[in-house]
Image (tube, rainbow, N blue to C red):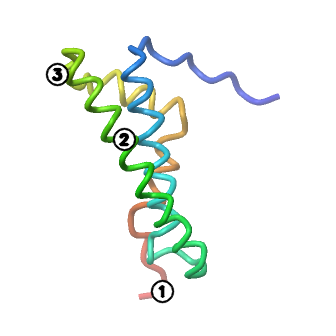
Amino acid sequence: MLPELPPLPALTRAEAELIDRYLEVVDLLGRVNPARPGDTYRSLRAAQALVGKAVALRDALTVMHRRGETELHAETLARALRVLDGERRTARVTLPPRTGR
């Protein structure tokens, strides 16, 4: 049995949309990361998809701003990201640890 994940914190619909769109962008950036193994075609496809996902992320933030949600509640949003495996997913965007040297 898999361990039970903690529940997502209470989010507005706009915050949930922001988290979802952010993670989509992060996943694509991880696939494009030139410091990670892979082929150029996979990276190209991810970069092409990134354009649309970045627009969706911008739109999610625009909705929040227009609705008067002018502050990002970082602690709550970070908890949501952790529940949604954000630590592993964002780690793909960074440089991998050095090997050898």
Is mark 3 in CB contact (under 8 Å) with mark 1?
no
Q: Nearer the viewer, mark 1 or mark 2?
A: 2
Residue placed furthest toward the top:
10
Image-quadrant location for residue 5: top right
In the picture, measured across the screen, residue 38 lies left or right of residue 76, that is right
Instruction: Write the residue at 44% across / 58% down.
Output: 50
Q: Position of residue 13 (x, y in %)?
A: 42, 17
Residue placed furthest toward the right:
1
Q: Secondary structure at mark 1?
A: loop
For disc 1, the marked residue is 100
Which residue type carries mark 1? Gly
Which of the two labelled residues, at mark 3 and mark 2, occupies the earlier sequence position? 2
Q: Nearer the viewer, residue 7 or 51?
A: 51
The C terminus: image quadrant: bottom left
Q: Position of residue 18 (x, y in %)?
A: 38, 32
Reply above or below: 31 against 55: below
The N terminus: image quadrant: top right
Q: Which mark is residue 51?
A: none
Q: Secondary structure at mark 2?
A: helix
For disc 2, the marked residue is 57
For disc 3, the marked residue is 70
Which residue type carries mark 3? Thr
